[in-house]
Amino acid sequence: MTASRPTADWATLAELERDPHPTLARLRASGPVVWVPVLNGWVVTTRAENLAAMRDDVGLTVDDPRFTTGRITGPSMLSTDGPEHERHRAPFARPFRLDAIRERFTDAAAEEVARLIDAFAADGEAELRTQLAGPLAARMMILALGLDIAAEDDILGWYARIVEAVQQLSAGADEPQDGRDAYAAFADAVRVALDSAEDGSSLLAAALGDASMLTRDELTSNAAVLLFGGIETTEGMIANLLHHLLTTESLAEVAADPALLDGAIEESLRMEPAAAVLDRYATADLELAGVAIPRGDLVILSMASANRDEAVFADPDRFDPRRENARLHTTFATGPHVCLGMHLARIETRAAVLGIARALPGLRADPERPSAPRGLVFRKPPAIWAHW
C-alpha cells in the first residue's frame, strides 16, 4: 500500500466554518483525499471519490462509537451498515417513494406555506429562515410522522435539546442527562403516535406494515433521525435557495418558469448542501485514490467540495439556475445511505418559493442586513431578512 499522506496543516476551523469553499478548492488542488489535522480526519474532495466512498459500506462505516447521534437515539438506519442497516431502512422505503410523497404532501406543503406567509404578509418585512423555512420543515415532519400537532412546541423543544446533546458529545463532553430526558419524552410521543396510528395515516403508520422486524424502540429511533434530518436539512435547503434567489434578484423569473425553478433547486443544492459532510470510519487499512488510510481513521465525505469539483462543474462558484448538469450534485448522497427524505424536501422547497413569489410581489433582500450560509457540517444563513 502506498505511503502517500497529503496534508493540509494550513486549514483552520474558523475558515471552514465561515466559508469553506476557498479552503476546499485548495484541498482539491492538493488531491482527492487529504489529511486535515484540524479535523483529525481525511477529507475526500472530488466528486468521483466521494461517490465511490458513499457506495462502500464495507471498507467505510458509520457504525462506530464516535458517531454521536447513535449514542443519543440508539441504533437506526443512520448509524448502521450492511444487513442491519437494510433491516432498519427497508420499512420506510415504500412510504418515502416519490409518487407516495407527491400525492400525500404537495397540497399540504402549499397550504402550510400559505398559512405561514399570512402570519407576516402585512408586516412588510420578514426573516424568512425562522418565519418560513424552519417552521415549514418542522410542521411537515410532525405531520409526516403522525405526531400530535398540538404538541409542536414540545416536540421542537425536545429536538433542540437532543441536537445540543449531540453537539456536546461531538465536542468531547459526557452524554448530557438533558439530552437523554428529551429523547425519552420524544420516544413517548412516538409510541403514542404508533399506538393510535391508522393504516397509512402517516409515513410512520405506513411503515408499520413492513416493520415487523423492528421493535418499537427501533421504530422510535428511526423516527427520531427522520425528524431531525427532515427539520435541519430541509430548513437549510429552503433557506439556501431563498438566499441564492434573493441575492441574485432572480426570484420572480425563476418562480414563473417551472423548469427554471427545478433547475434553481438543483443548482442551490449543488452550491450549498445543507448537510455538507458525511462522517465515515475505516474498517481496515485501505487505500482511497492512492492514499493509505489506517484502520479506524475518520474519513470525511465532503459534498460541499464534490459539488464544486472543477472537473465536473464549469465556473463552480457561480449560481446558475440554467446549469445543465446541476443534478450531478452529491447532496442527497448515493448508495445505501441515499437520503430518504429528498422527495419531501424538494416538494417543500418548491412550495416555499412559489408561495412567497405569488403572495409577496416585489420581495427583495434587505441590503442593510445581509447574510450568507455558514457552518462546516450544516450550512444555512443565520438570517434572511427581506422586505416587499
Image (cartoon, grey):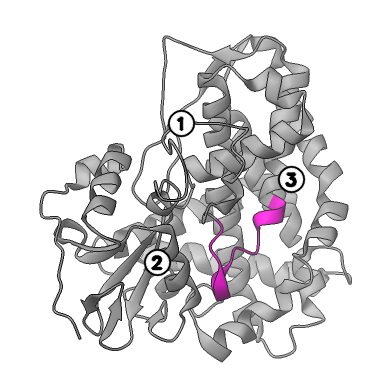
**Quadrant in the picture for residue 117:** top right
Q: Can residue 112 be seen at all in this image of the molecule?
A: yes
Query: Where is mark 1, residue-wise?
Result: 318
Q: Nearer the viewer, mark 1 or mark 3?
A: 1
- The residue closer to the viewer here, 329 or 312, is 312
Q: Which comes before the other along the chain, label 1 or label 3?
A: 1
Q: Which residues are magenta?
A: 332-344
Q: Position of residue 279 (x, y in %)?
A: 37, 67
Q: Is residue 8 left or right of residue 105?
A: left
Query: Where is mark 2, residue-wise?
Result: 49
The amino acid type, in three-letter code, at marker 1 is Arg
- The residue closer to the viewer here, 387 or 40, is 40
**Quadrant in the picture for residue 237:** top right
Disc 1 crowd rating (10 Å Cα; few below 14, some 14-19, many 20+) is few
Identify the element where label 2 is drawn.
helix
The amino acid type, in three-letter code, at marker 3 is Ile
